[in-house]
Image (cartoon, rainbow, N blue to C red):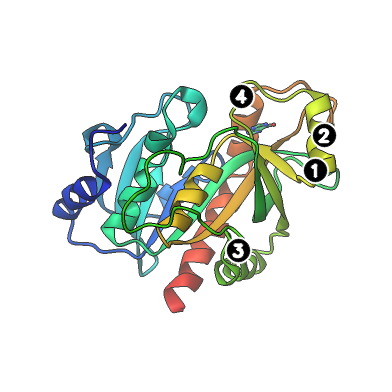
């Protein structure tokens, strides 16, 4: 159990800046370039924040920013804790509980994924419409939290209005966004071709190792959620190449400007609602 209460971490953060954003964005591979557009009010390393786990993966910085994108105040989390790093689920999702306690109401999650749907290409972006949790773990397992639902409805985990904003944002920057279902595995090995064929028959369009625990906890906390993936590679057996983290990072680097444009336009539209 994380010894720190998310409310204590939120109180700590509130003392660091007077900014009170309603929107938070978690940056995964392919989206960090948005930081070049952020007017930073305050940057805090995760290592300083009570209860935050330190990410251990290259490409995941571990910094929280208070700032503005255009005229809109935002909280940006650059880097996340993954289940495959060995963190228990309450640590993987601690940042989300902290955001909720802080007063965030809307959460945009971004990530890198492997494309299962044969129409998808490396470098495409996909808006999540739903997910399949194949992590063999649920972040809500454990003692019930007083004041929060024990059995959380996930019928519309991904908010329709925020999804519509993402598609609008894509239109503005002339990006064709895919839509589909993200299947989450624990990793950290990539999948076998047989697993990917199985996931395809289950209805998955992409596969990744994050996001789903954060979505589940965010929904328990009543946050509106949207999520978008950068398809960094074709999933095992879909393309001819073998999979590597280097390829994931190389694709993320190649399309970083598109990822940043998408987020920037999304936040601009969000600021007008
Ligand atoms: N599988 C799982 N996670 C991933 C992949 C993949 O192919 N690409 C990026 N994250």
**Figure label count:** 4
- In the picture, residue 140 is in which quadrant? top left
Distance in Å between CA atoms under marks 3 and 1: 19 Å
Which residue is painted at 60% across and 65% down in the image? 163
Secondary structure type for disc 3: loop
Label 4 Cα crowd, 10 Å radius (few <14 / some 14-19 / many 20+): few
Distance in Å between CA atoms under marks 4 and 1: 25 Å
Counting residues from the N terminus, which is met first, the one under dot 4 or under dot 1? 1
Label 3 Cα crowd, 10 Å radius (few <14 / some 14-19 / many 20+): few
Specify the label residue 245 is tagged with. 4
Instruction: State the residue position of label 2.
Output: 198
Q: Are marks 2 and 1 in contact (CB under 8 Å)?
A: yes
Instruction: State the residue position of label 3.
Output: 156
Secondary structure type for disc 2: helix
Counting residues from the N terminus, which is met first, the one under dot 4 or under dot 2? 2
Distance in Å between CA atoms under marks 2 and 1: 6 Å
Apparent side of residue 191 relative to residue 40 in the rendered image (left or right): right
Q: Is residue 85 visible?
A: yes
* Camera-nearest label, 3 or 4: 3
Counting residues from the N terminus, which is met first, the one under dot 3 or under dot 4? 3
For the N terminus, the image quarter is top left
Q: Are marks 3 and 4 in contact (CB under 8 Å)?
A: no
Secondary structure type for disc 4: helix
Q: In this view of the protein, which residue sits in the foreground, 56 or 136?
A: 136
Apparent side of residue 109 relative to residue 35 in the rendered image (left or right): right
Distance in Å between CA atoms under marks 4 and 2: 23 Å
Instruction: State the residue position of label 1.
Output: 202
Apparent side of residue 188 relative to residue 87 in the rendered image (left or right): right
* Residue 36 percent coordinates (x, y): 42, 49
Secondary structure type for disc 1: helix
Which residue ends up furthest to the left in the rendered image? 15
């Amino acid at each position: 159990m994380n010894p720190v209460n998310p409310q204590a971490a939120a109180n700590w953060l509130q003392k660091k800046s007077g900014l009170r954003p309603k929107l938070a964005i978690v940056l995964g591979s392919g989206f960090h370039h948005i930081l070049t557009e952020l007017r930073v009010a305050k940057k805090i390393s995760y290592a300083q924040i009570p209860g935050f786990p330190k990410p251990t993966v290259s490409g995941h910085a571990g910094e929280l920013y208070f700032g503005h994108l255009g005229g809109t105040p935002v909280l940006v989390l650059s880097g996340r804790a993954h289940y495959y790093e060995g963190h228990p689920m309450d640590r993987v999702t601690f940042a989300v509980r902290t955001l909720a306690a802080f007063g965030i109401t809307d959460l945009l999650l971004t990530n890198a994924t492997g494309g299962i749907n044969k129409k998808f290409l490396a470098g495409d972006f996909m808006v999540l419409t739903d997910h399949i949790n194949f992590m063999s773990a649920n972040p809500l397992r454990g003692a019930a939290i007083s004041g929060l639902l024990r059995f959380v409805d996930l019928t519309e985990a991904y908010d329709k209005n925020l999804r519509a904003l993402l598609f609008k944002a894509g239109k503005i920057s002339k990006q064709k966004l895919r839509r589909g279902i993200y299947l989450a595995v624990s990793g950290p090995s990539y999948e076998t071709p047989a697993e990917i064929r199985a996931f395809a028959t289950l209805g998955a369009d992409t596969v990744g190792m994050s996001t789903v625990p954060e979505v589940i906890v965010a929904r328990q906390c009543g946050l509106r959620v949207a999520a978008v993936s950068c398809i960094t590679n074709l999933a095992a057996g879909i393309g001819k190449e073998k999979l590597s983290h280097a390829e994931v990072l190389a694709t993320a680097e190649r399309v970083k400007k598109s990822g940043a444009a998408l987020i920037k336009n999304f936040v601009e539209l969000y600021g007008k609602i």
